[in-house]
Amino acid sequence: MPVVCPPMPATPTPEEPTVDAPAPQVDIPSEMLTAFKQVTLPSSTIRVQPPGGKTLVNFDTIFSTKAERHQIDVHLDKVDIDVVLEVWPSSFAWHHGDGTSQTTTIPGRAWTEGDEVSPDNGFVVHRYTRLHKAAPVSVDTTWSAQFKVAGQPAWQPVDGTVTIAGQPITLRVLEATPALVAGQG
């Protein structure tokens, strides 16, 4: 009959020094994109000329908005650092409310007397071809960004954009019939 011996206790070994696990790598550009998507960016309010919520068929209707470059202080919790996020409008999607839209890199501008209305002069223009009782017009602003660690000089691009939809306003498109009017004098 075989003899079964109880297992021998393991020989104690000197305790090995404890090594901390390496800190997990944090993808700073990815963290910046996440932060960029979470900061509050302004929506753009569309301005229309002629004013008063009405325009005419076959008339240059002028659109503009206000959106400016600005800086936002952000704290990245995963790496416990403060960064400066600089954002700017990189494109504008204009929705005319008649099934058409256009994209520009400019916010347009308001017309003043003496201005020649032309895209070359910074105007965003649309010409309606038919009547509309209530055309919902709006502008969506796409923002781009760059960042730098607070106190450091070098800017780095944020890989991605954020688009903020603008609130629509109602524009009535009317038709006018030209008529000669007797002059004075």
Image (cartoon, rainbow, N blue to C red):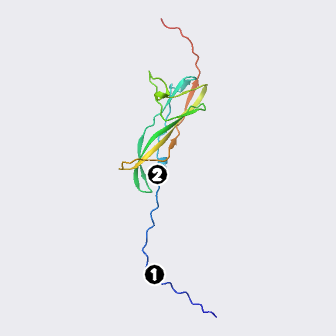
Q: Nearer the viewer, residue 119 or 76?
A: 119
Mark 2 residue crowding within 10 angstroms, few (<14) / some (14–19) / many (20+): some
> To which residue does mark 1 refer?
13
Tell me the number on the disc at residue 185. Answer: none
Nearest the viewer among 143 and 66 is 143
Residue that numbered label 2 is attached to: 29
Query: Secondary structure beneath disc 2?
Result: helix
Give the amino acid at mark 1.
Thr
Q: Is residue 174 left or right of residue 18?
A: right
* Picture quadrant where residue 128 is located: top right
Horizontal side of residue 65 vs 3, given as left or right: left
- From mark 2 to mark 1, how far is it between C-alphas? 45 Å
* Above or below 16: residue 121: above
What's the residue at 47%, 55% (across, down)?
A: 27
Rendered position, 7 above or below 175: below
Residue at image position (41%, 41%) is 70
Q: Position of residue 80 (x, y in %)?
A: 41, 56
**Horizontal and vertical percent position of residue 179:** 57, 13
As drawn, the residue found furthest toward the bottom would be 1
Please give the name of the residue rendered at 50% of the width and 33% of the height, measured from the top-left corner: 46
Q: Position of residue 97 (x, y in %)?
A: 58, 32
Which amino acid does the dot numbered 2 rest on? Pro
